[in-house]
Amino acid sequence: MSTQRRFLAYCDKLFTPSESFIPRGYSAFSKLKPVYIGHELKGPVPDGAEVIELGPLHGAGGEAAYKQLGTISAKLQNAMEEVEPVAIHASFGKSGAYALPLAERLNLPLAVTYYGGDATKTTNTKDSFVRVYNRRRAKLWREADLILPCSQFIHDELAGKGAPTDKMVVHHNTADPSRFEPGEKKDLLVFAGRWTEKKGIDTLIAALARLGEELNGWTIRLIGDGDLKEELVAKLQEAGVAAELPGWVPADEMPRHWAEARIAVVPSKRAKSGDAEGLPLVCIEAMLSGCALAATRHAGIPECVKDGETGYLVDEGDDAALADRLARMLSDHERTARMGEAGRAFAMESFNLQTQSRKLESYLIDLAVKAGTMRASDV
C-alpha cells in the first residue's frame, strides 16, 4: 500500500515526559500511522507527530460533557471523518473509558493497554473523571476488542477483577537498545523514579543506612523527585549516607546514567491505595545498559529480573534483605559484571523494541481488517 492508514492513539494527557514509552511503542509501525488524541499536552510534541487536541472540538458542556456523558460534538465528528481512522489504541484504562464513546460512534475497533496502577488501584475515586472509569469499566471490558496488559502480573490483576481473559494478550514494555548500551562502568549505584510510596525508595534508603562503610568508594545517585523527597532526604542525612540528588533528569539524558552504573536498584512495592507497577521501564533500560539489578518481587519485575542471574530479588519492603544483596554486589565486581552482561542479553532477546512495536501494529491491523475498517489487500 502506498500510504499509511491512520489510527487514533488516545491518551488523555499527551506526551507526559515520564510516558515516552507510549510514542516509542509505535516507532516500528510501517502500515499504520498514529494520530495522537487527548485533552491536555503535558510535554513537547514529537517531530512529525499528528495531534488532535479535543478541547477546541467540544460543543456545549466541553470536556465534562464528553467525558461524563460521551457527547460527540459535530466538530469532533467532522475532524474524525477527515482523519478516517481504522482503529483506536488507548493508553491506560482511564483513556480507554474516555475513548469508548468515540469508538462506538465511529464503529472503530478499540484496543486498550494497561500499565500498572490503572489495573491495581482500589481507591480510584479522587476526582469525578476517574469515577467515569469505575462506572464504565465493565462496559469497556465487554466492548473493547483487545486488552493489552503490560505484564503477566497486570493480566492476572485484571482477570481477578473480571476482565475477559479471551480478550487479553500480554504485551511487554520495551526500551530502545540503540539508546541504552553499556559504557565504561564506575562504582555507581543508581535509583531513578518518582519519590512516591509505590517506588519503594524508602526501602532503598533504609538499606543504604544499614550498609554504612560498605558504601565507601561508591557513588550513590538517587534520580527523581516527588512527595516523599524532603522526608527521605532527611533520613539520608540522619544516616550519614552521602548521595547525589540530581532531581528530575530528562529522558534523553538517562542513557548516560545507566551506561556508567554498575548497579541499578528498583525497590518498588504496592502502595496502600493498591497502586502498583506493571513492568517498570527502568528495569529494561538498566538491563540493556549492562547494569546488575537489585529489585523486589513486585508486579512484573520477576518477569525480567532473574534472581541470581541478572540481579537479585527480595521481598517488597525488606530493607535488610536488600542491604544483604547490595553488599554482595558492592564487594564482587566480577559477579556484578556477569549479571549485567546476562541482563543485557536477556533484555535484547525478550524486550526488543522493534519486535514489540511490530507486534502491536499487527494486533491493530488484525482488528481493523476484522472490523472492516481496513481491507486485507491493504496490508
Image (cartoon, rainbow, N blue to C red):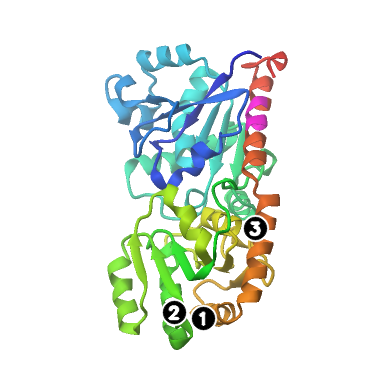
Mark 1 neighbour density, 10 Å: few (under 14) some (14–19) many (20 or more): many
Residue plotted at (67% across, 65% down): 306
Residue plotted at (54% across, 45% down): 114
Marked residue nearer the N-terminal end (1 or 2): 2
Q: Which mark is residue 323?
A: 1
Give the answer, above or below, for where 339 lies relative to 149: below
Relative side of 343 to 14, left or right: right
Q: Position of residue 84 (x, y in %)?
A: 52, 14
Residue 47 in view, yes or no:
yes
CA–CA distance between discs 1 and 2? 7 Å
Q: Main secondary structure of the magenta part?
A: helix
CA–CA distance between discs 3 and 1? 24 Å
Instruction: Find the magenta span and give its range.
Output: 361-365
Q: Which mark is residue 257?
A: none
Q: Amino acid at mark 3?
A: Arg
Q: Which residue is mark 2?
A: 208
